[in-house]
Structures are given as structure tokens and as C-alpha cells.
Image (cartoon, rainbow, N blue to C red):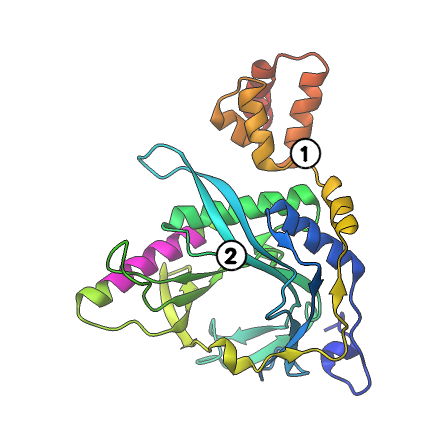
Amino acid sequence: NTHIDPVVCGLPGTLPVLNETVLEYAVKTSLALNLNVAEHCKFDRKQYFYPDLPKNYQISQFDEPLAENGWLEVEVAEKGKETYIKKIGIERLHMEEDAGKLVHAGSDRLAGSKYSLVDYNRAGIALVEIVSKPDIRTGREASEYASEIRRTVRYLGVSDGNMQEGSLRCDVNISVRRGPEAPFGTKVEIKNMNSFSAIQKACEYEIERQIGVYEEGGEIYQETRLWDESKQITKSMRMKEGSSDYRYFPDPDLGPIEISKEQRNFWFKELPELPGQKRNKYVKEFGLSAYDARVLSDEIFMANFFETTVNNGADAKLAANWITGDIAG
């Protein structure tokens, strides 16, 4: 614990300060995801008692988030099916601070461990949480959605998006309903997925598990489950709390944020050409296949290298074959 500060530790008299760069990055991410950025938003205290949060509340946003009502289009390649475009709605994006991390000796969770260590090095670091609407229907769609968000934040330069290092984290809420017109069932939250393939596998397993429970006449309980990568199953972790349990109230130490239309427009003009825009351009203007366009736009440095090559006189299709074959391998 070498990178901790008095605010995270909850020491008396310490006050939080908003990082202005975080606000800029959060607004740019919101704009890239087609969200409506609020002119006015505020911070709230999300209160809970757990060892990873010494001051016993997390600075977050509750009823007045930074941005709402967006969407993201993703290309989905299901095995044995044609690739299709899925438009996934985004409920909101809000800013909050990260909590610490528990490391359990002898187990992957608190129960059954010999002892637990608390890592506060990431506590207090700013992050944004993106909440999607219930538009995702398969594990593949979920993994492609998360992958497209990763591409987007890497293009923006706001995060490296490395899931293995915790720069990008994903929790999945899954519920099964009996038909397309039936109400949504009880949702279960899945945690501990540190790769896109794990997201897909966890979703597929949990969907089948819930279907099996219903078919046997059982009941699904609102809970948090853990993805076990070694066993390829989800395991019960704890019963899920509702939002009312957190006793949100406005943070008195952080004032409200006012974002002018002029400031939003300024940040919007600074956005780069995004992955979806590049894919469309490569297909329509350069005559590339959808596959080549996807590979070339996957990383911004590869897209820039391809465009520089073409702008210097190379044939687009030959350049694409060379880069995706000899260079990308």
C-alpha cells in the first residue's frame, strides 16, 4: 500500500477534489457513445461497510449522472451465422471513485480463505461506469459489446482498456424470461470475468443454468455470482443488495458540475474518427471486405498505419492484405 492518500483512508479533515481531466475524459467517452451529456450533474455518497473502503462510502453519482440515453453499434459474428449489426442501448454513464481490492489466501473469496489482505493502491482512482440497457441477448453479443467499448476508449486515449490489469472491468446481469413478450425474470449479477472470452462463456453458462432451474420448477434469486475460470461455471457469492440499501445522498464536499454547451461542443470537435466510422469508410471508400475493415480498425495504431500507407500512394486492397497478413500475422 504505497499509493494511498488521506481521503481514501477517511482521515479527519481531509476533503476530496475533482480531477478536471477525468471530467474531460468522461464527457468525451459519453459523446463517443452517443449519450446526452447533462448540463448539470452532482456527486453522491454510496454508503456501505466493507474492508476495501475505509471511509465507508464511495463517491459516485446516483440520480443525476453525467450522461444518459446513448447507444453503440457492434458487429456480431455468431458461430454458424451471418455477421449482423446490433444496436445496443446505453442507459447512463456516471463518474465514481474506485475501491480497494481484497486478496484472499487459499481461496478465491473470503469464505474458505486462510486470511485476507487489502490492497488500497487503486482506491480513490477515478473511473466511469457504463450501464447498458437490456438489449443484449447472447453471450457473443455481450463480449462484442465489451470489446467495442474497449476499442472506443483506446481510440479516445482515455484508457488502455487492459482487462487483465483491471483498466476495463465488466459485470453482467442476466435474467431469463419465458417468451419475447413475457416480463424480465429475476436478474443475477456475474463478476470476476477478466477476458472477452470469459464474458461470453459466463453468459452462456448462466443462461443455461437459469433455464435449467426454471425447467425443474425452481426459483431464481437475486444474487451476485462469481465466474470460476478453472471450472467454467458460476458460483454463488452473496445475495444482491438493492440500490436503497446504499442510502445515497448528495456529497456535501463536492459541488455540482455545470457543463456548458460550448464546452461540450469543444470536446466533441476533439473526438477522433471512431472504430465504427473507420470500418464504414474502409468498406465504402476503399472497397475492403468487412473482415479486413474490422481487423484494420481494431487498434488505432494499425488504422493510422494503413491510412498513411494508402495516402502515400499504395493500393488500398494490397496494403490491407500486406498489413493484415505479413504484419499483423
> In the shown orientation, is residue 80 left or right of residue 215?
right
Q: Residue at x 67, y 82 (%)?
A: 54
Asked whether 165 falls inside the magenta stretch, the response is: no
Where residue 98 appears, as percent x and y from the top left, is: 65, 68
Q: Residue at x 44, y 54 (%)?
A: 199
Q: Which residue is mark 2?
A: 194
> In the shown orientation, is residue 217 left or right of residue 117?
left
Between residue 133 and residue 237, name the one nearer to us: 133
Q: Residue furthest bottom?
A: 12
Location of the C terminus by quadrant is: top right
Report which quarter residue 236 is drawn in: bottom left
Q: Residue at x 58, y 47 (%)?
A: 150
Q: Which residue is mark 1?
A: 301
Where residue 122 appears, as percent x and y from the top left, is: 68, 67
Where residue 238 appears, as percent x and y from the top left, is: 42, 77
Marks counted in the figure total: 2
- Sequence-wise first label, 1 or 2: 2
Disc 1: CA contacts within 10 A as few (<14), some (14-19) or many (>=20) = few
Indicate whether 203 appears above or below 108. above
Identify which amino acid the numbered label 1 is placed on: Phe
| Distance from the alpha carbon under mark 1 to that under mark 2 | 24 Å
Disc 2: CA contacts within 10 A as few (<14), some (14-19) or many (>=20) = some
> In the shown orientation, is residue 264 left or right of residue 328?
right
Indicate whether 277 appears above or below 120. above
Q: Which residues are magenta?
A: 199-211
> Residue 215's mark?
none
Instruction: Answer whether residue 12 is visible to the viewer in this image.
Output: yes
CB of mark 1 within 8 Å of CB of mark 2? no
Asked whether 207 falls inside the magenta stretch, the response is: yes
Label 2 sits on a secondary structure element that is loop
